[in-house]
Image (tube, helix red, strand yellow):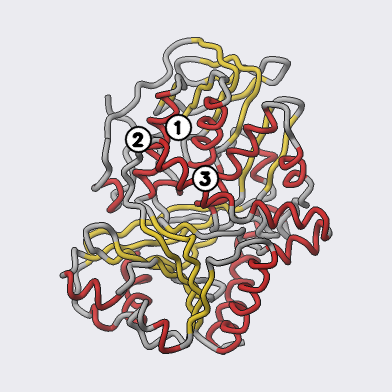
Amino acid sequence: MIGVPHVASYYAASANNTVEREPLADHISSDVCVIGAGYTGLSTALHLAELGLSVTVLEAARIGWGASGRNGGQIVNSFSRDIDAIEKVVGKERGKMFGEMAFEGARIIKDVIHKYHIQCDLKHGGLFAALNSKQMQHLTAQKKLWEKHGHVDQLELLDGNDIRLCVNSERYIGGLLDKSGGHIHPLNLALGEAAAVESLGGKIFENSAAIRIEQGANPLIVTAKGSVKAKFVVIAGNAYLNNIMPELQAKSMPCGTQVLTTEPLSDDLANHLLPQDHCVEDCNYLLDYFRLSADKRLIYGGGVVYGGRDPANIEAIIRPKMLATFPQLTGVKIDFAWTGNFLLTLSRLPQVGRIGGNIYYSQGCSGHGVTYTHLAGKILAEAIHGQATRFDAFSHLPHYPFPGGHMLKVPFSAIGAWYYTMRDKLGG
């Protein structure tokens, strides 16, 4: 059986298990049908299966085919907009709830890894790196904000000397170390979570795109060769929905980010670049992010392509960024380069909701999805199981349309990104 392959990434080349699941070729029933086998869908399915519900997952391509199997592999706490920005929208009382949830996604990931013995190269420690004094002030405020919401004994401010013990680069004047952050092999995490779902009786079908959803008391999800009748549906396609629910795509936009991976580095060079083996992201609006793989490659990502098109030459975009950070890598060979889409919302806050009484969705992580998606899966499972307090908190976040509608949201967003890029370069 040959279906849609994973993108030719380092992650696909080093995946633990590449066995394809059979496509759906029957008419079956299930308590819940989840559309999408990325982190949102897999986390939802796993939490539902742990609650004793029967779950069927439909994946249009392969498990972790989208952002869940292509991302930078960094476990970063909070949301794409931080707790203080959310508090301004929802008020202080409900803001406390978001503060409590801001650090839960990372805990869910680590709990799942340990509970189901998932081999995904988990490493601890994540670093936010400041390129100028204004960014350092932001990190100082971020530390106070996170500690205010209970994230204590995990954060350490680093000055210019301290950060060089973590990142051997002249670019950074300081940083903030989050000891509860970390990094993983993202595709192997997704594959391990899929195996965990199946170990609890859940069913996963690959190469089984949902063609349409017939709504009603018991929705019917139709694929090319089969169907699933369910009590509840969870739509978890994010940037790869493919028009299954046009109303969900009207207020979001797919954006591409690019990643490259070097050849394996010597132990001496790898330890020279990142002595503590932490993952790193800078504080720019259009940020760079990087880390070492388990076999000592540097994985370096950055850049945004609005609208989600694939750039012609990924290496030409990312290599200059990598060399600006680590000129020590001049001449190093690039073994892999790929792109993948994440889903951007205008507010940069996730969109969570319900269509009718039994179709749930979560989308729009806005580039901050590894931890949020795992939290979202738990919250969606809670709501389906009858406890909707946290789901309601997310569902009340406003969903704004992009200015100018579908045709103009890409150029308007690109103009906004240009503004923030110039502000980053000027240190503003």
Q: Position of residue 312 (x, y in %)?
A: 36, 62
Is 277 in front, or is 8? 277
Q: Which one is closest to the eye, mark 2 or mark 3?
A: 3
Pointer 3 or 1: first along the chain: 1
Q: Where is residue 128 in the image (x, y as percent from the top left)?
A: 49, 73
Q: What residue type is labelled 3?
A: Ile
Residue indicated by mark 3:
108
Rendered residue at 65%/51% (across/down)? 101
Rendered residue at 45%/66% (across/down)? 126
Is 367 in front, or is 409? 367
Q: Where is residue 330 in the image (x, y as percent from the top left)?
A: 22, 80
Q: Determine which of the numbered discs, if any, sits on residue 223 in the image.
A: none
Q: Which residue lies furthest to the left in this view?
A: 266
Pointer 2 or 1: first along the chain: 2
User: Are the residues flagged by discs 2 and 3 in contact, CB closer than 8 Å?
Assistant: no
Q: What residue type is labelled 1?
A: Ala
Against 183, residue 143 (above or below) is below
Q: Cα distance, mark 3 to mark 1?
A: 26 Å
Q: What residue type is labelled 2?
A: Val
- Quadrant of the snapshot with the C terminus: bottom right
Q: Determine which of the numbered discs, if any, sits on residue 4 in the image.
A: 2
Residue indicated by mark 1:
60
Q: Residue furthest front?
A: 153
Q: Where is residue 140 in the image (x, y as percent from the top left)?
A: 61, 79
